[in-house]
Structures are given as C-alpha cells and as structure tokens.
Amino acid sequence: MNQEIELYDLVNDPYEMNNVARSTNPVILGQLHAQLDAMKHCTGASCRVADSMPNGAISAPALLVQ
C-alpha cells in the first residue's frame, strides 16, 4: 500500500489546498505520525493518549525543514 502523507496548516489553509508534509521537519512529522497511530489503536475509558501529548501548539515555522 502506497499512501501519500498529508499535513495541512488549517490556520493559513482552511480548505486544505496546500499539502505541507514534504516541507515539514521529518522528526516532527514522525512524532505526529506516532501520536496518530497511538490514538487509532487506543480504546476504552483508560485511554489517555491525548493527555500524554505535549501541551501547546507547535508553531508552523517549527514544522518546516530548515
């Protein structure tokens, strides 16, 4: 299965026209993927995956590859 990774800046691109995944820092992209994977497999009242994520938003410039 070959799926393109998609990531959108919903603040500046609310209609999801510009996929920024290729210009995103690969480390942060990996962290986001791991968090999404954990949430996909999390079930029940004891699931606290979202609570274990860092507080605060990641600023858009931090996502970009330097």
Image: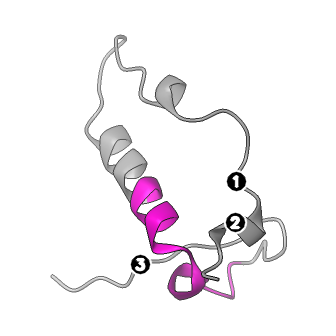
For the C terminus, the image quarter is bottom right
Mark 1 is surrounded, within 10 Å at the Cα level, by few (under 14), some (14 to 19) or many (20 or more) other residues, namely few
Q: Please give the residue where the numbered disc 3 appears in the rendered image.
A: 5
Q: Secondary structure at mark 1?
A: loop
As drawn, the label of residue 58 is: 1
Residue 39 is left or right of residue 65, and the answer is left
For the residue marked with disc 2, what is the amino acid?
A: Ala
Residue 65, percent across and down?
Answer: 60, 81
Horizontal and vertical percent position of residue 20 = 61, 82
> Which mark, residue 30?
none
Q: Quadrant of the N terminus?
A: bottom left
Q: Considering the numbered disc 2 on the image, is that residue within a helix, a strand or a loop? A: helix
Residues at badges 2 and 1 in contact (C-beta under 8 Å)? yes
Q: Nearer the viewer, residue 25 or 36?
A: 25
Label 3 vs 1, first from the N-terminus: 3
Residue 37's x, y, as percent?
Answer: 31, 49
Residue 13 location (% of width, % of height): 79, 77
Mark 2 highlights which residue? 62
29 falls in the magenta region = yes
Membership of 26 in magenta stretch: yes
Residue in view at x 25 percent, y 39 percent = 41
Please name whichever residue, 54 or 35, is drawn nearer the observer in this view of the structure.
54
Which badge, 2 or 3, comes first in the chain's sequence?
A: 3
Q: CA distance from mark 3 to mark 1?
A: 19 Å
Q: Which residues are magenta?
A: 16-32
* Residue lying at 78% horizontally and 71% vertically, measured from the top left: 14
